[in-house]
Amino acid sequence: MAEVVKLRCQRIGCNATFTEDDNPEGSCQYHDSGPIFHDGMKEWSCCKKRSHDFTLFLEIPGCKTGKHTTEKPVLAKVSATPKNPVASPIVASTTSSSSKETCPRCKQGFFCSDHGSQPKEVAPTKDKADISTYPAPAKKIVDINEPQTCKNKGCGKIFKEKDNHETACSYHPGPAVFHDRMRGWKCCDIHVKEFDEFMAIPPCSKGWHNADPTS
């Protein structure tokens, strides 16, 4: 009996494993254009979704679907252009006071270049309201045979809890580091210039697969 060869998808935002015989159209969800990094904000140029936090940025689901592939995508160079409010503080202040509360990015807690980052005013108030209003979510009970996707950085494999063990997962404990146009992981001290090279840095740690790392 021929051995089933599992391949790793190279599309940006996917990183899942697949086989040639099990690769239907729509099984891959990915980003077809590279990221933009500007003034601490990360944005996918293909769908314009953004986040100030790198962990949340990587969890933004892909905006395109198709088949998995082992071919690395060729990404066009994308340059970030500063928005007008950066050069005109008076206009930015007026916009902030009038539409910050109705801005969908601000309401979801994402960094917004139009209204700026105001942790003293926005973040603590939002966190306190959430803690006092909503109880902590209950831990999801999962069947040991149910396929799950590991959310550890650098893994992304499909696993079953019955096969999970202390060395099943290869991942980056992080955090990711972006400095002077270099991208890398603090955990293994490897830094590169291109984003696709950064995504291809091999994991440096072993541990349990985790489908819900924030809980």
Image (cartoon, rainbow, N blue to C red):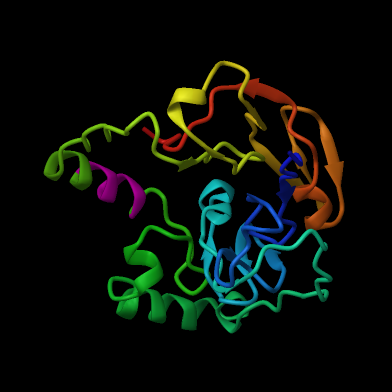
What is the magenta range? 122-128
Could you tell me which residue is drawn at 61 percent across and 39 percent down?
153
Residue 213 belongs to magenta span: no
- Residue 161, relative to residue 73: is it above or below? above
The structure residue drawn at horizontal position 63% and vertical position 62%, both measured from the top left corner, is: 23
**111 or 14, nearer to the observer:** 14
Q: Identify the main secondary structure in magenta.
A: helix
Seen from the viewer's position, the closer of residues 214 and 104 is 214
Q: Residue 188 location, x and y as percent?
A: 78, 28
Q: Is residue 42 left or right of residue 149?
A: right
Can you see residue 178? yes
Observer-nearest residue: 23 or 102? 23
Whether residue 148 sits left or right of residue 141 in the image: it is right
> Above or below — where is 119 with respect to 214?
below
Position in image of residue 71 (x %, y %): 82, 63
In which quadrant is the C terminus drawn?
top left
Instruction: Determine the residue positioned at 63% across, 77% down.
Output: 46
Residue 79: quarter of image: bottom right
**Near-viewer residue (148 or 62):** 148
Quarter of the picture containing the N terminus is: top right
Quadrant of the rendered structure where residue 4 is? top right
Q: Is residue 179 visible?
A: no
Left or right, 62 with reference to 38: left
